[in-house]
Image: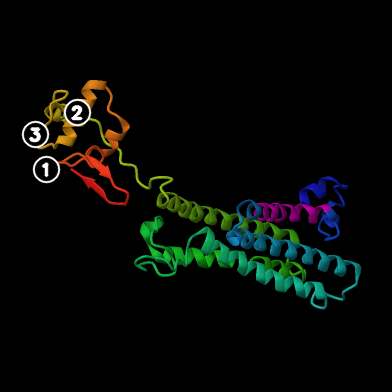
C-alpha cells in the first residue's frame, strides 16, 4: 500500500503523505486479504453445512478485519486532533483489546488446526501437547516446542509498532521494514509445519503414502522375478481341471456348476455367487442349487 501511495503522489511528498492513516486505499489494500478469506470460509459453510471449522475460521479473519478498522479509526482521530493522544482515544483502547484477541485466536488456530498439535486423541500420548508423528529434526520434541514459542513471539510483533513507532522512538518506516521481515520468517516456518501436518493427514486418510520403497533392479532381481512368474504359472496349471470333471474333494453342487459351464460356455451369475471354494479339499455345499424354500424363513438344503 505504501508503494502504491508513494508513486501515485509527488515523490517529494510521498513519505509524509503515505504514512497517514487517512489514505483510504491503504486501508482498502490492508482489508482485502482477510475479507476474501472471510467470505470464502462463510461460503464453504453454506456449501457443506459444517459450522466447524468454517465458521470458526471465518471468526478468525473477522477479528483481523476489526483490528485493521479500529487501528485506522484511532489513527485518523489522532491526526485530526479528536484525541489528545493515542492512549486517551477510545478507538485505540478497543484496537489494543481486539488485537490481543485476534493474536491469541490466530495462534490457537496455528498450533491446533494448521499444525495438528495439542492432539488429545493421541493413541499412546508419546508426544504430549504435540501429535503422534513428528518428521522434522528426527522427531525431537524440543524443536517443535521451540517453534511454537517462536510463532507466538512473532505473532506479537505488532506491539513494536505501538511501543516504538507510534511514540516516535524509532522512525516508522524502519519498524515497518523490520516487522515485515519477521512476518515473512514466521510464515516460512508456518509453511514447513503446515506441510508436514497435511502430508501426515493425507497418509492417514490414504490419499498419499508416507514412504516410497525404491527397489534396485539388478540381474539377480530379474531372475528372481522370472522364477516367481514361472512358479505362479505352474500353480495355475496344477489347479486346472477338465471341463465337466469335478475335482477331488468337491461336492455335487460344484460338479453341477462345472457341468453347466461346459454346457453353456459361461457360468451363470447365480452359480458364481453361490459357488464356494474349499481350500483344504473339504466337501462344499451349494445352498442355492439344492434348496427348497418354505413359506417361512428357513432354508432346507440337500
Q: Neighbour class for label 1 at 10 Å: few (<14), some, many (≥20)?
A: few
Q: Position of residue 222 (x, y in %)?
A: 20, 28
Q: Which residue is mark 2?
A: 258
Q: Which residue is mark 3?
A: 248
Q: Is residue 259 left or right of residue 77?
A: left
Indicate which disc, 3 or 2, sits on the residue closer to the N terminus: 3
Q: Neighbour class for label 2 at 10 Å: few (<14), some, many (≥20)?
A: many
Q: Which region shows up in magenta?
A: 25-43
Image depth: mark 2 or mark 1 in front: 2
| Residue 4 can be seen, yes or no | yes
Q: Which residue is mark 1?
A: 282
Q: CA distance from mark 2 to mark 1?
A: 17 Å
**Residue drawn at 70 percent across, 53 percent down:** 39
| Residue 171 can be seen, yes or no | no
Q: Position of residue 76 (x, y in %)?
A: 86, 65
Is the C-beta separation of discs 1 and 3 under 8 Å?
A: no
**Residue drawn at 31 percent across, 52 percent down:** 297
Q: Position of residue 210 (x, y in %)?
A: 38, 48
Indicate which disc, 2 or 1, sits on the residue closer to the N terminus: 2
Q: Is residue 53 left or right of residue 93?
A: left
Task: Characterize the magenta stretch by its predominant secondary structure.
Answer: helix
Above or below for 237 versus 181 = above
Q: Neighbour class for label 3 at 10 Å: few (<14), some, many (≥20)?
A: few
Above or below for 169 versus 271 = below
- Give the residue at the far left of this rendering: 248
Is residue 30 found inside the magenta-colored segment of the image?
yes
Q: Nearer the viewer, residue 265 or 233?
A: 265
Query: Which of the 4 image quarters holds residue 281?
Result: top left
Q: Is residue 165 left or right of residue 130?
A: right
Is residue 248 found inside the magenta-colored segment of the image?
no
Amino acid at each position: 500500500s505504501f508503494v502504491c501511495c508513494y508513486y501515485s503522489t509527488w515523490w517529494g511528498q510521498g513519505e509524509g503523505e503515505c504514512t497517514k492513516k487517512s489514505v483510504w486505499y491503504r486501508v482498502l489494500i490492508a482489508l482485502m486479504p482477510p475479507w476474501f478469506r472471510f467470505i470464502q470460509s462463510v461460503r464453504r459453510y453454506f456449501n457443506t453445512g459444517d459450522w466447524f471449522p468454517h465458521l470458526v475460521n471465518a471468526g478468525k479473519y473477522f477479528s483481523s478485519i476489526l483490528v485493521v478498522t479500529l487501528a485506522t479509526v484511532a489513527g485518523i482521530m489522532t491526526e485530526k486532533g479528536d484525541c489528545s493522544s493515542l492512549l486517551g482515544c477510545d478507538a485505540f483502547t478497543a484496537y489494543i483489546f481486539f488485537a490481543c484477541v485476534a493474536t491469541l485466536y490466530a495462534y490457537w488456530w496455528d498450533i491446533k488446526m494448521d499444525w495438528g498439535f495439542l492432539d488429545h486423541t493421541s493413541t499412546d500420548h508419546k508426544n504430549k501437547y504435540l501429535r503422534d508423528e513428528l518428521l522434522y529434526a528426527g522427531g525431537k520434541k524440543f524443536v517443535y516446542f521451540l517453534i511454537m514459542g517462536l510463532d507466538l513471539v512473532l505473532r506479537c510483533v505488532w506491539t513494536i509498532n505501538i511501543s516504538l513507532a507510534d511514540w516516535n522512538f524509532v522512525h516508522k518506516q524502519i519498524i515497518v521494514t523490520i516487522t515485515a521481515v519477521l512476518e515473512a520468517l514466521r510464515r516460512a516456518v508456518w509453511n514447513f509445519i503446515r506441510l508436514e501436518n497435511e502430508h501426515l493427514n493425507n497418509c492417514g486418510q490414504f490419499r498419499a503414502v508416507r514412504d516410497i520403497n525404491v527397489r534396485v533392479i539388478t540381474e539377480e532381481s530379474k531372475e528372481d522375478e522370472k522364477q516367481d512368474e514361472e512358479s505362479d504359472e505352474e500353480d495355475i496349471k496344477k489347479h486346472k481341471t477338465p471341463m465337466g470333471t469335478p475335482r477331488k474333494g468337491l461336492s455335487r453342487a460344484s460338479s453341477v456348476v462345472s457341468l453347466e459351464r461346459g454346457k453353456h460356455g459361461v457360468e451363470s451369475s447365480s452359480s458364481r455367487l453361490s459357488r464356494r471354494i474349499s481350500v483344504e479339499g473339504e466337501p462344499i455345499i451349494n445352498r442355492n442349487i439344492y434348496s427348497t424354500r418354505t413359506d417361512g424363513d428357513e432354508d432346507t438344503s440337500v
